Image: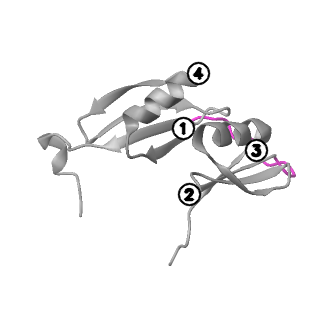
């Protein structure tokens, strides 16, 4: 299968709050917005994410078990920017032995948003990396 893009759509009653959150904190651009469904492109030409109000007995996303991972050039700058903007971290900024430095925040529907930059892993974790 040749895939052109992979994106995630969350079923939620908080479409407006999610649109505003990702536009405000992650420079998301609206690609499509019907009010009940919004498609956002992160960072201009990055990945997209969608939010949709439940249709015909669809279950609403419960906000558990999902982590959105954003690999960025400078995690320290992103941490400073987002905490200065008033967001609280759910996980503090720290180095991780598996090969990154990161922190997380929560979005309006309970997704953990993990923001990180790559680092060299410690020897114990190097064996798990594949080319």
Foreground: 101 or 56? 101
Residue indicated by mark 4: 86
Indicate which disc, 3 or 4, sits on the residue closer to the N terminus. Answer: 3
Which disc is residue 59 wearing? 3
The Cα atoms of the two marked residues, 3 and 2, are separated by: 24 Å
Verify CB contact (< 8 Å) between mark 1 and mark 3.
Answer: no
- Image coords of residue 117 (percent x, y): 35, 42
Q: Residue furthest left?
A: 123
Foreground: 108 or 25? 25
Q: Residue furthest bottom?
A: 1
Q: Nearer the viewer, mark 1 or mark 4?
A: 4
Residue indicated by mark 2: 47
Say which element carries label 1.
loop
Q: Is residue 63 magenta?
A: yes
Q: Nearer the viewer, mark 1 or mark 2?
A: 2
Indicate which disc, 1 or 2, sits on the residue closer to the N terminus. Answer: 2
The Cα atoms of the two marked residues, 2 and 4, are separated by: 25 Å
């Amino acid at each position: 299968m040749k895939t052109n893009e992979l994106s995630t759509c969350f079923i939620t009653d908080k479409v407006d709050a999610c649109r505003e959150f990702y536009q405000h904190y992650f420079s998301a651009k609206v690609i499509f917005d019907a009010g009940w469904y919004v498609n956002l492109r992160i960072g201009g030409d990055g990945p997209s994410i969608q939010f949709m109000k439940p249709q015909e007995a669809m279950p609403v996303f419960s906000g558990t078990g999902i982590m959105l991972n954003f690999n960025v050039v400078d995690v320290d700058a992103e941490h400073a920017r987002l905490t200065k903007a008033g967001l609280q971290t759910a996980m503090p900024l720290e180095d991780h032995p598996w090969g990154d430095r990161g922190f997380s925040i929560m979005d309006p529907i309970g997704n953990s948003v993990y923001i990180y930059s790559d680092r060299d892993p410690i020897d114990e974790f190097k064996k798990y990396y594949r080319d």
